[in-house]
Structures are given as structure tokens and as C-alpha cells.
Amino acid sequence: MNTTYSIWKPVDMFSTDIVKIAKNKIGLKNKVGHAGTLDPFAEGVLILCFGQHTKNVSEIMAMQKKYLAKIKLGIETDTLDRTGSIYKQSEIPCFNEQEILKVLDSFIGTVKQTPPPFSALKLNGKCLYEYARLGIRIIKKSRSININSIKLIEYSSNSITVEISCGSGTYIRSLAADIARKLGTHGYLEELKRLSVGEYNRENSLTLEVVLLENLLRIGIF
């Protein structure tokens, strides 16, 4: 039970739901933890640590991550993703590929980022999202993050899709909103896939169907 495995989390599930399923499989008294939350609307790599490997959570969270993100333009929501309510709206200017690439390049390297009000960061022992749900938007100080690359995958008149390689502590929702603002409009994160965390990717991740339906002891996981 001292091991680490990657699960491909499906859309519309909480990361804690996956942890609960794993605990039910191996016994509720055993230690299980995840190394980095994925929002319910997102899918992708979710690392589970079992037993003594829960001590490695911080190390795993520090690994490089890769995301595929679709940014909807013209609207910003209060959560900065598709689950929120409309917070701001603006016209979408006409832009071409070179203009988009120039904006994306401006985010490469060590940049400052303000964490979103809807996040698990804490103030006085409470998560920021708890304040936000009460209508209190807590704006934390900006902090340095590292973006290794942002590749433009496709774009239309009202959305762009990018592949992002970044370091720990990066909020893709905030990055999406920042990119939209630099394009001269507003935006929110419409779709998100975490493609990899370090060496963990879709190819070496278990599907939820395997976790739910297979006897994990028989296939040698625990």
C-alpha cells in the first residue's frame, strides 16, 4: 500500500471523490492523498499517493505540469471558469495569429500572477472560495510563477485553445483571464485538461472504470 498511481479524472467529479473511491477499495483506515486538486469541470492526470508515499505529495506537486486549455473570450466569470456567473463583459477585438502569439510569448518565463478569489488558498484558516461564496472577494498579493511554454493550438473569433507547460503554483484560470485581458477583452476558462504531471500522463494513468470495476489487488496495484 506504499505506492503512487495516476488516475485520469473525468469531468464533473471532485478530486476528493477519487480519493474516497480509492479508500473504499483499500480500506478506509489506510492513508490516501492526492498531489494537486483538479477542478470538477476539468479532466486529466490526478496523482494518488498511498501509505508512506503520502510524504511525497509536496515533491510531486512541484513537478512540471502540462495543460490543454480552451479560453472563451468576451466574458469573465466570478470563478474565472465556466462554472461561475458572468462578472464582466466586453467586445472582442479582431486579431490575427501573430498578434495572439505575441501575447502568449509575453507570459513565458517568470511572471507575476494574482491567485483567483475562488481558490483553496487560506486566510485566517478559511479557504478563499468560502469567502467568495459569501460575496467577499479576497484578492491575494501577486506571486511569481514560471511558464515554460504556451503553444497556440487553434483559435476562432471568440475562443483560443493553448497548450501550457508550467511550474507549480500556476492557476490556469487566472492565466486564461490574463491572456484575454492582454488581447483587449475578457475571458474565462471553458475547458481544461491536465495532460501530464512530471512523467505521469494519460498513457500511464488508470481510468476511473478500472478503479471502480476491477479488483485492484488482482491487477497488482495495491
Image: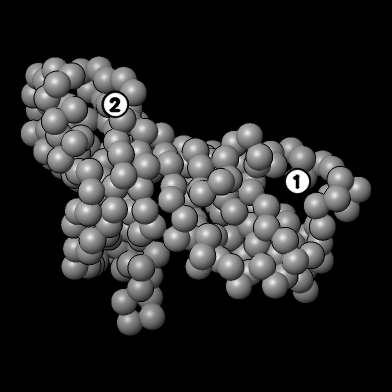
Apparent side of residue 101 relative to residue 66 in the rendered image (left or right): left
Of the image marks 1 and 2, the number of the one nearer the N terminus: 2
**Element type at marker 1?**
helix
Residue 182 seen from this side: yes
Mark 1 or 2: in front is: 2
Q: Which residue is mark 2?
A: 152
Image quarter where the C terminus lies is bottom right
- Graded by Cα atoms within 10 Å as few (under 14), some (14 to 19) or many (20 or more), the crowding at tag 2 reads some
Count how many numbered circles sit on residues in the image. Answer: 2
**What residue is drawn where x is 31% and y is 44%?**
148
Q: Is residue 82 visible?
A: no
Q: Tell me whether the residue at label 1 lies in contact with that at label 2, contact meaning CB atoms closer than 8 angstroms.
A: no
Callout 2 amino acid = Leu
What label does residue 211 carry, if any?
1
Q: Is residue 145 left or right of residue 90?
A: right
Q: Amino acid at mark 1?
A: Val
Image coords of residue 153 (percent x, y) = 34, 23
